[in-house]
Amino acid sequence: MAEDLGDGSTAEMDEYETLMSTTDVELLKTAWRNEKAAPEILQFQALLVKRAREQIQLVEETVEEFEGSGMDPLTVSLYQMDLDRAQFLLRSYLRVRLQKVTANSLLRNICSTSGRMIIYGTGSLNQRKFLLKGVLMIWKNILKRLFCQRLPDNYQSARRQSIISEEDDMVPEPQLDTFVACKSSKNFVSIRLVDSERPLEMERHDVSFVLYKVIEDKIGVEIDLGLKNTPRSCMLQIVLKKFVHCCCWHKTPSEDAFWYQKSLEFIQQNQH
Amino acid sequence: MAGQSDSPISLFSPEEVEFIAEDELMEIVPNMRMDPLNFICGDFGPFFPQIPVKVPLWLAVALKKRGKCTIRPPQWMTVENLTQVLEGEREDQGTFQAVPFHYIEISRLLFDHSAREDIPDIYMVRSLIEDIRDVRLHKVETNLEKFSATSAVKIAHLSAMEVNVVRPFVVRSLQAFYKHDNPVVTADLDSMSNRQPQVRQPQVPNNARRIVAQDCPLTIPFVLQQPLKRR
């Protein structure tokens, strides 16, 4: 969902909206709404979250100072309200992400060619580590030892139903053939649809329910916030991709270990 | 403050929608002096008695509750304008009138929070807005009956709360249409797929979206399993 339509869509309004969209609260709100509405997990707004955290901390300190210095209680309470709102937004955003990370598609994101959250660098590093840990535990302890090994030979894979499966059909996949409600963040957007010659033309006041994958890559550009990779996550992509290639094609233990080590180092280095 | 909605993830609770609407700007007339407020969500003020100033709705309501200002109702919130909108809604069954995206939430917040005496003809305004809301919701419902399978439905001037109300139904029904209707594998789905056809869901053009992944091997084995296995 994009910008809200206010009283009118005059030039003044546009100006105001541009001005408003520059505050981090507004950006965070958009990020939260997008994240909540999208069926898959979007690019993590790491910088934005960092900035919001810093600002929240700053205001917290200011409020404490105010209280100490006998500032007008009304002003203090108003600052506190603003603080509460910002914190609520940040919490909501992070909570939605955590919910998605845990509930939605834990395995898919690591195993699949298509899940891009981990391997393709969405998700914050902490979330990635969180996932890696969780998945390791599940796979190693529960699935493998207690369950899969006791099945007949053909059914031992935890990712596939049986050895005749051609795909990882036991891995849950986010439901992407779904529809989302969206608004245009520009005055006019034209979207190519899969099933019709005529593009979908949206103006600011239009709300459209659209097949998610049609607008997927427009979120942030014309519909809203960015899915573009930051340089750092690109780097991580490359490292992890290499690692994955090694595992698949050159199955020598030493090489595996080498790349495994490399990836871990990389993740640690980029922790901050 | 808005409550968290639990499940499913993608639905907003009415409180959350209201929270979003609380950032809409309102004009207030303060009756006290106050320095500018440098909030995380922007800078507002300074405030002088009898000098109108624009602040977000939540701040307006907070000040109003403490008796520090009067709220100027938004321009659209007049009996004449609302009557006109209502007539328009009734006359034209196909389309929606242009109303502010958050008109339901804004009016609710204003009516609920002691801003009543600031709105002229409050009872009239209130019942007009309720009528408009009912007519519009009814219209959405009847229009939804005419749905057909498609990959996009555009509704001009639908408001935030209305979107929120119809979203679950619309999404589910469009999804169902899509699923049953679907054999279409279109031009842009094709080129990227070096994957094998999916066995599980033959009816879904499964390769539609994963372009990022194409230079990877067909399936990536569970990466961290590898080093462990060899022990």
Image (cartoon, rainbow, N blue to C red):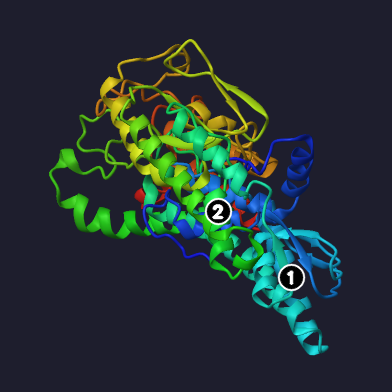
Give the image quarter of residue A64.
bottom right
- Residue at 80% across / 62% down in the picture? B44
Residue B100 appears in the picture as rendered? no
The amino acid type, in three-letter code, at marker 1 is Cys
Q: Which residue is mark 2?
A: B125
| Whether residue B22 is visible | yes
Report x, y in % for residue A209. Answer: 45, 32
For the point 43% across and 48% down, the residue is B10
> Could you say where residue B148 lies in the image, as x and y percent from the top left?
33, 22
Q: Mark 1 — on which chain does it sit?
A: B
Image coordinates for residue B228, horizontal then vertical, percent: 38, 52
SS at badge 2: helix
Residue A234, quarter of the rendered image: top right
Q: Residues within 10 Å of mark 1 (few under 14, many from 20)?
A: many
Residue nearest the observer in this picture, A162 or B150: B150
The percent position of residue B100, horizontal first and vertical second, equals 60, 43
Q: Secondary structure at mark 1?
A: strand
Q: Is residue B111 shown above or below A249?
A: below
Which residue is pictured at 43% across the width and 43% down the height?
A109
Q: Is residue A58 toward the left or the right of residue A254 in the image?
A: right
The quarter of the rendered structure image containing the N terminus of chain B is: bottom right
* Cα distance in 3D space between marks 2 and 1: 21 Å
Q: Identity of the amino acid at label 2?
A: Val
Q: Which residue is mark 1?
A: B69
Residue placed furthest toward the left? A152
Q: Are marks 2 and 1 in contact (CB under 8 Å)?
A: no
